[in-house]
Amino acid sequence: MSCPATIKQILRDHKDGMAMPREMYTSREVYDHDIASFWNRSWIWVGHICQLPEPGDYFLFDYGPESIIIVRDREGEIRAHLNVCRHRGSRVCVEQSGRARAFVCPYHAWTFELSGELRAGRAMGPDFDPGDYGLFPAQVRIFEGLIFVCASTDAPEIDAGLAQLAKLTAPFELANMKIAHQANYPVPANWKLAQENYLECYHCAPAHLDYARSHSLKNPADVEALMPALLDRAEAVGLPRETMSISSYEGGPVGADVYYRRYPLFEGYQTGSKSGAPLAPPLGRLTGHDGGATDIQVGLINFFLVYADHLVGYRFVPRGLQETDIQVVWMVRGDAEEGRDYDIDDLTWLWHVTTLDDERIIRHNQDGVNSHFFRPGPLAEMEWGIRHFYNGYLRMIGADRG
Amino acid sequence: MSCPATIKQILRDHKDGMAMPREMYTSREVYDHDIASFWNRSWIWVGHICQLPEPGDYFLFDYGPESIIIVRDREGEIRAHLNVCRHRGSRVCVEQSGRARAFVCPYHAWTFELSGELRAGRAMGPDFDPGDYGLFPAQVRIFEGLIFVCASTDAPEIDAGLAQLAKLTAPFELANMKIAHQANYPVPANWKLAQENYLECYHCAPAHLDYARSHSLKNPADVEALMPALLDRAEAVGLPRETMSISSYEGGPVGADVYYRRYPLFEGYQTGSKSGAPLAPPLGRLTGHDGGATDIQVGLINFFLVYADHLVGYRFVPRGLQETDIQVVWMVRGDAEEGRDYDIDDLTWLWHVTTLDDERIIRHNQDGVNSHFFRPGPLAEMEWGIRHFYNGYLRMIGADRG
Amino acid sequence: MSCPATIKQILRDHKDGMAMPREMYTSREVYDHDIASFWNRSWIWVGHICQLPEPGDYFLFDYGPESIIIVRDREGEIRAHLNVCRHRGSRVCVEQSGRARAFVCPYHAWTFELSGELRAGRAMGPDFDPGDYGLFPAQVRIFEGLIFVCASTDAPEIDAGLAQLAKLTAPFELANMKIAHQANYPVPANWKLAQENYLECYHCAPAHLDYARSHSLKNPADVEALMPALLDRAEAVGLPRETMSISSYEGGPVGADVYYRRYPLFEGYQTGSKSGAPLAPPLGRLTGHDGGATDIQVGLINFFLVYADHLVGYRFVPRGLQETDIQVVWMVRGDAEEGRDYDIDDLTWLWHVTTLDDERIIRHNQDGVNSHFFRPGPLAEMEWGIRHFYNGYLRMIGADRG
């Protein structure tokens, strides 16, 4: 997708290893181009197959001005459609989730099959061919039960990376999970500042006391020191020793980053809990708790942190130029029962308090970036994830530095 | 008025018979041009002479960033002035209605006669000529007691059409009416989507159950079948059999559309009431209820639905790019008394519930139109009113397809 | 600073002696340019040394998207820094005021000395030189205890003017004051309309009944008649008879206006109080109340009204295109005690009610200026202050009429 000259001009002095310029976070034109060129062409994690057990079950996923219907069709296949009537543009589906036999537009009752086809255009005359006016399809990938969609037809080629990832995640049996809790943390900042915050642990030590107490990632030396013992313990409970990283920064396909790495918790912590004690039964075919956490990234904007007993998924959903929803999803194994096997308050404690910290941090970051005096500074080595993100992002929006 | 190149570019692929492109409803430049080129040069229905019985009586009508003072002057004539001080631009009149001897600007007390002339410019020095600084006049037309204004000096030539309309509306004696109730329904959508919703009854069957139960317009075949009997009944109570339609789409002058057509209610409905029973005494010189409703349009943005016993007026007033007030006015004959001759809840029931439906529909329409994936679809035959509106609108904004 | 062509085009027909065009108050581009070219290069009154008694004491001053830290450093010097981290742009200081040993960025803990120097960049690698990444400094001037800052390095040359002013204000001993009360009056208008309102007393008679009852400024003839007696009384209590005015309109340096003039209250008023009675002990070395008030202006946007017993400071702080905070600060002599020497309600009464009037007036002014029909009218002789402001403002933004 071609990048407007004004945006290329904003980026004229940007160099690898430096933060991006102010206008990338303050310009409405950049925001609109982010939606059109980046979000609408990215793989987005929208949910899990456990949300759609039966044909006709659907839910909506909204971002920026877009809305996508994710539905299990009559044949049992999961499909996705742009939630925009092909007549005069009304939202076709207005409930956030439910079970439907067809989607009837609330305006003029144009009726779409679960497959997206237009059943008929009422009173549209003899020349009208319903075959021309089905809902626009979005692409769908199911990865171990996790549902990803891409609104555009030219989705990034991520299948090879996912196949490689599947070998590493197999022991977790991600398809056999349930959603224990979801929470939404609105932050008055551009989505990229929210996402950048997730992409580095340089801020973990000063900003996240609770996380830093239990997780070694805030200190690369600690990670290195504790890693051999962790890998032994991980292997003992059934997890692989391998890591993987595909990134356009390292020559991978654009928009198809895949990352997997397990890192150690400190002694006494078996999972991301306040006390260190387990929070739920081990996932999949794991035989116990190893005191580690796996960072998984799929594409450029989907993040999963997988402990031995639960998964925390993260999304940074744009709502406006400086309005973003941080969406956090906690998942446990599918047969776990609340009250018996896990407690919601205990399960969600760490990433609830950590996300509240981040909300504050990101807000102050946007406040400062809004200043005419902001000059992008150098990234620390620990902020390598931001460099990778910038590379993929700039290439997606058509502004890569060549 | 010349149309900016950016707007012409938005419309480059638009064809007659199709919905308009997304940016016509999402671009601030389009909105500003809508106000300057369309609203400021259109005839707007602002009220009724019953609101201004005495010299000095005034009310304001506001839309977009504009405000107009409508006032009966000392000679008894109804005049309209732009509510902008000629000094440094303050609103001159800040009360929504009242009785005034003159308009004294609340900032520096520049004092304007009811006729708009500046009485004197206090301490403005010897070279200052108050004759140069009267309030800018708006054009005024009184049609059967209904007050129309146009802020610009080059108002559409609507007099011939109104003269023709007057012959058809004479039996209603519209000048002899009073306002029974007014209501405002804000909707987070561009004014054009709100207006388009009023311009077609293709959505009436699926979206308006109460209206569809009593009114035939949702089904052209029903209208045709019931029309002969209605026309006989209408004639019997004193109404004409004729219809009229002047539209720029059919070669009429731009911005001067005039439309009149009576259509049938279903059996058992004498007026637009819940039970079908009359709601008020017959209007004007009508001798009874005929079970019909007259659709009247004056210019491009003023709508009246006239039953045998009441009138419902509609306006779709822009407040911002995606903020519109749907204003509904219920009128009955001038000598009707609330409590004795009509009940407000009964009178307003149908168009209150119908407008609440429309608010929801229009909101969902804007949500979908905001999507980058919205592609304008084909209009149904029943949406002919939208084609006519587009024609007049596009010519007013200087973007007609030639 | 160069002025965008679009803004020069807006001003193409503007003439000295006339109000400015609509778009100067409605265009986002103008607003952004106002911050970058005018506010960021202007001297801004931010506070008084009484707010920073000890090393490490600081407070923030925010305007538009900017934030400035004003702090007393370890050597006792008052300094100002841009509140933007040189790493990825976070606000460095997030409390409005306090006492600090250093400023630790809440994001990644980059730590800045009170002097603005970066102590160290944690984990930034061997090539990183902290000397390159100190906080950007803002310029500081202390005038008789009043603190002025300028965010830009090329601040207007105001020292000569201030030296001249100091001779006239010496008897007030402005450095020996304390803040009795501060209040914030948000107004939905462009900051220039709020400031213009302060710059003229043409509106005082019609709009400010309480002020007009006691202050002669609303009527130039009254000022002239009462002035000789006032000057005698002023001299008797220790005040000078002189006035001074430096203005770019009269050939002075741009952005460095300085103005001093005492004017008479009406008989029976010793100060700006409801009853006319004194409100507090005489300022500095004044020996009594003379029934006058001094208008002081420093730069283009800082205003002080000094009675014999208190000072009222005014700022019109931009928050958005049509969002402004009118900030009012009441000061009394430093050793005055609330309850014993002054009463807050009495002290603040006049400028509280007057500012409430102004909030309403300014709001109506913006409403009218938003109209497409607003045409700038001629300024009255009494509005000379606006002419001076326009001159300085237009030259600061690079759009002076040559």
Image: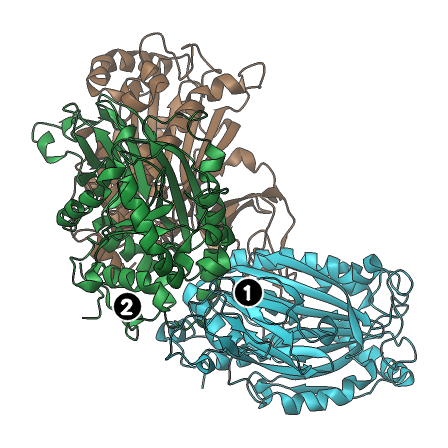
Chain colours: A green, B brown, C cyan
Q: Which residue is mark 2?
A: A6
Subunit under mark 1: C
Between residue B125 and residue C115, name the one nearer to us: C115
Q: Is residue C177 left or right of residue C392?
A: right
- Crowding around mark 1 (Cα neighbors within 10 Å: few <14, some 14 to 19, many 20+) is many
Q: Quadrant of residue A102?
A: top left
Q: Is residue A188 left or right of residue B297?
A: right
Q: CA distance from mark 1 to mark 2?
A: 27 Å
Instruction: Find residue C129 and report its horizontal and vertical position in percent.
Output: 42, 81
Instruction: Find residue B40 and report its horizontal and vertical position in percent.
Output: 39, 52
Instruction: Find residue B136 and report its horizontal and vertical position in percent.
Output: 49, 58
Q: Which residue is mark 1?
A: C318
User: At 49% from the left edge and 82% from the top edge, which residue is drawn?
Assistant: C395
Between residue C39 and residue B96, name the one nearer to us: C39
Q: In the current view of this chain or complex, which residue is farthest to the top?
A: B268
Q: Quadrant of residue B2?
A: bottom left
- Crowding around mark 2 (Cα neighbors within 10 Å: few <14, some 14 to 19, many 20+) is few
Subunit under mark 2: A
Residue C35 appearing in the image: yes
Task: Name the amino acid type tagged 1.
Answer: Pro
